[in-house]
Image (cartoon, helix red, strand yellow):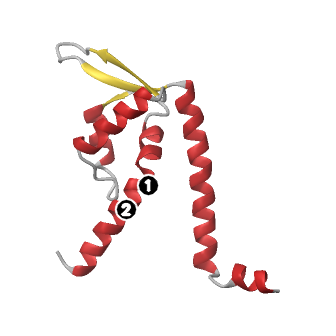
Amino acid sequence: MTETNDANAKWDAQLRKGTLELAVLGALQHEAKYGLALLNYFRTFDTMQITEGTLYPLLDRLKREGVLTASWQQEGEQRPRKFYALTELGHQKLNELSARWQRSVEDLQQLLDAPLKKKESDNE
C-alpha cells in the first residue's frame, strides 16, 4: 500500500468511526434488515467497509438504548435471521443526527470555500 493510500485508509477509518451510528440508522430508516444484509449494503460504499466485529456490537448497543428493536424472522426454508428496525426513538435520533451532520457539512464547506472569512469578520 502506498503512503497516500495508507493515509486515505486512515482518513476513511476515522470518518467512519464518527458516522457509523448515523449510517446504520439511515440504512434502517425505511425497512428492517438483518445483520448480514446491512454488512453487504455497507460494502457497496467505498468508505463504509466495516466488519461484523464493528457492526454487531453497535446494533446491540442501539437495541439496549431503545433506538432499535430486534426480532427473529424466518423466510421460507432459510434459517431464522435477526432483523433490526428503528423504534420511534430511533427515528428521532436519526433526525437529530442527520441535522447535526448537515450542520457539520455546511460548516466544513464554509471553511473549505473561504478559510479566512470567519476569522477576518471576528477581527473587525
119 on left or right of 7: right
Type of the residue with mark 1? Gly
Disc 2 crowd rating (10 Å Cα; few below 14, some 14-19, many 20+) is: few
Up the image or down, 73 lies above or below 42; here it is above
Q: Quadrant of residue 83?
A: top left
Q: Which residue is mark 2?
A: 14
Which structural element holds mark 2? helix
Residue 18's label in the rendered image is: 1
62 on left or right of 43: right
Q: Nearer the viewer, residue 37 or 50?
A: 50
Disc 1 crowd rating (10 Å Cα; few below 14, some 14-19, many 20+) is: few
Quadrant of the snapshot with the C terminus:
bottom right
Q: Position of residue 113 (x, y in %)?
A: 61, 79
Up the image or down, 71 lies above or below 55; here it is above
Type of the residue with mark 2? Gln
Up the image or down, 71 lies above or below 20; here it is above
Which structural element holds mark 1? helix
Quadrant of the snapshot with the N terminus:
bottom left
Question: What residue is shown at x 37% (from left), y 62% (from top)?
Answer: 14
Q: Position of residue 94 (x, y in %)?
A: 55, 39
Q: Are marks 2 and 1 in contact (CB under 8 Å)?
A: yes
Q: Position of residue 22 (x, y in %)?
A: 47, 45
Q: Quadrant of residue 70?
A: top left
62 on left or right of 75: right
